[in-house]
Structure formats: structure tokens, C-alpha cells
Image: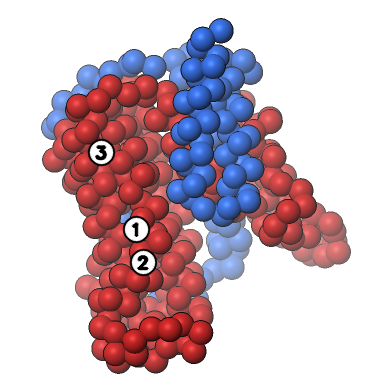
Amino acid sequence: MSKRTRSPKQVVDPNEPAWKTTLRVSMPLNISYIPIGLACGILLHAAGFNTLLTGLVSILIFSGGAQFLIATMLTINSPLLSIVLMLFFLELRYALLSSSLSPYLRGKSTRFLFLFAVSLNDENYAVNYLKFATDKKWTPHDALHVEHYSLLFWTVSNLIGSLIGSAIKIDLGVVNFALTALFLYMIVMQLKNRITVLIALVAAFFAVVFMCWTKSTIGLVISTLVASFIGFLLESTLRKRLPESHWLWKLRTHAGEPSESDGNE
Amino acid sequence: MNAVNTWNSTQHFWLIILGFFVAFVPRFVPLMLFTKREIPEWFNEWMKFVPVSLFTALVVKDIFIDSKTYAFTMTGKLPEMIAAVIVIIVAYRTRSMAISVVAGLVAVFLLSLAFGGL
């Protein structure tokens, strides 16, 4: 996998070594990991994690959302079981990501799939999925390289965050908002048709109801299962009965109605 | 928000190990299954709505739910609420995760100062 041809638009040395190609492809992602990794490291430090464990959690879990969630739930003193359950439901979405990448990884050894799964996450999935879909020369090994570069940048940023977290005093409420902003960003990226906007509102409603009722974060899990199942039922019913329904219309990708569905429940 | 957690490093370690397994299984099992066979359509259709539902619930928790009493609040976190609207607009316009997060942090920092100073 050393020789590859390039699309004519890109002005790149055709003899560029594979490690350089994958580094170049992963660089925008790596850069954007730096501020978020720093914030995550600071937050984990504030939640009581030492630097060694911050490095360990960055390598073993390698998920911004999950690590922010751990930090948040620790600061509100959630029980272990509750945190692990929340993590499970948070990470369940990876089943979708790895399902949709699997056509490109057919015939790979179990050892390779293991390595690939360990360092898969939302962002390197997005990079690799796009490359697999558009670049015929993109190999599973290239994809694994991208994963490892992003893992490296993420872990180092977390470690630095953890170290400077000991030196500076931060407003936890402010840094914690990095998590909220990250999730808001992900919601906006998820809004593809009108049903999704409706389901976001339904999920917001159930989240309030179930969290006030259970007085615990388990309400998040229940509301997620209920809202996503309603979305599934609604969409499949509409597809069958009213395939012309405007609820199935796609949202315009730019301008037009922005998705103000979540800020104002 | 000065609640400091009382867990020790051993407890943190076990949390990481358990967290690793719940993070790893959903990533690995579908890869093992579906590099060999097809994805069941209904499952895919259901799972499609999980991310948006979960992220919305998490945002609602951060903005509308009091972290200690789990009571619904419309006014308790005004800076976060306004910053959330800003993040949504920035995310929609830029489609960049880094810019959205940084914009949100700057917004909530400035708004907290502004509201704190009143």
C-alpha cells in the first residue's frame, strides 16, 4: 500500500509515502482535537482524575462525548452503575458507525477489526467514511492510520490539559459548556429532515419528564430509547402510508431555516 | 459548580475499565457481524434516531435541569441558554466542531461575567 494515484485536482507528489498521505488527510481533525482535548483534560482534572488516568481514559475510551460525560457525572457524584450505563447508551451509536463502515472492511482479520474498533470514534469515522466513499485507493490500513493520528493528538491534548489543569483554577461551569456545545454541534449535524427536528423536540420533552420523574440521569437513557423508537415508528409509518408527507422533506444544508429546535424547549 | 468528587484513583481506574468495555463492544460486534452479513434494516432505522435523541437529552440536562435537585428550571442557567442558541447558529453556519465549541466557551464565559456582574 505504498503507491497510490491521486485525483487530478490535488497537487500532491504521487510518490508521497503512505504515512504522509494519511497524516495530511487527518490533519484538520487533529488540529480541531487540540482545544477540545485540552478542555477535556482540564475538566477531567477538575473531576479528580490524575494525569496518568487521564491518559489511560483517552486511549481506552477515546471519545470526547464519553470523557466529558464521565467528568460531568463525577462532579455531580453519580453512582458508578449510572455512569457506566450512560456510557453504554452514549457509545451505542458506534454500532451504527461501525455497521456502516463494515462493507469497506470485508475480509479483514479479527485482529485488524479489533484494532480498528478500539480507536474508532465519531470524527475519524467521518473522515474515513468520506475517503472510502470517494477515493477508491483508500485502504483499511490508511483508515487505521487516520484513527491512530487522531488518537495521538487527542491523548496528548488531554494530557496537557490535565497538567495545566493543576496549575490554573477554572470555572467548571464554563468549561463544562464545552460538552454542551459539542453535543449541540452533533445535534445540528444530525438534523437531516423534518422528522429529526421533531424527534429532537420530542426527546427534549421526554428528557425533562423522565429526569424530573426519576431524579437521576437514568432518565436520559429512558427518554433516548422512547424518543428514538417514536422516531423509528413515525418514519416507517409515514414512508408506508404517506410517502409524500412534508415531514420526510430534507432540510436545506445551508441558510434557510436554522435548527433552533433545541435551545428553546 | 464547585462540587468536588470524592472518588479515589482506584475507583477511577475501574470506571475506565468498565467504560472501555461498554465503549468497545458496540464498536466491535457490528464490525465482526457485518463484515460477514447484512445489517437488519429495522435496527438500522431505529438506531438512526438514537444520536439525535441522546444528544438532545444531554443538552436539556445541561441547560434546563438543576444538577442537584433534578428539577426543571427555565431561568437558572440563562448564560448557558443564550450561549446554546449561539452555538446552534455557529454550528449550522460553519459545520465545524472546533469553531462551535470555542464559540460556545467564549460566549458562556462572557455571558457569565455579564450576568454575574449585575
In the image, A202 versus A188, the foreground residue is A188
State which quadrant residue A236 falls in.
bottom right
Kindly identify which chain the residue marked by label 2 belongs to. A
**Kind of residue sitting beneath label 3:** Gly
Q: Residue at x 55, y 61 (%)?
A: B43
- From the top left corner, tell me how far across and down residue A112 is, in percent: 25, 74
In the image, A121 versus B29, the foreground residue is A121
Q: Colour of chain A?
A: red
Q: Earlier in the sequence, mark 3 or mark 1?
A: 1
**Is disc 3 in contact with disc 1, using a CB cutoff of under 8 Å?**
no
Q: Are marks 2 and 1 on the same chain?
A: yes
A118 up-or-down from A167: above or below? below
**Number of the label disc, if any, that sits on residue A189:** none
Q: CA distance from mark 2 to mark 3?
A: 21 Å
Please state, as top left, top right, bottom left or bottom right, where the C terminus of chain A lies in the image. top right
Q: CA distance from mark 2 to mark 1?
A: 6 Å
Residue at the limit of the structure toward the top, as seen here: B118
Q: What residue did someone put label 3 on? A: A161
Q: Residue at x 46, y 40 (%)?
A: B102
A218 up-or-down from A99: above or below? above
**Kind of residue sitting beneath label 1:** Asn
Q: CA distance from mark 3 to mark 1?
A: 15 Å
In the image, A259 versus B45, the foreground residue is A259
User: Would residue A183 be visible to someone looking at this image?
Assistant: no
Element under disc 3: helix
Q: What residue did someone put label 1 on? A: A30
Number of marks present in the image shown: 3
**Kind of residue sitting beneath label 2:** Ser
Kindly identify which chain the residue marked by label 1 belongs to. A
Q: Are marks 2 and 3 on the same chain?
A: yes
Q: Colour of chain B?
A: blue
**Number of the label disc, if any, that sits on residue A26:** 2
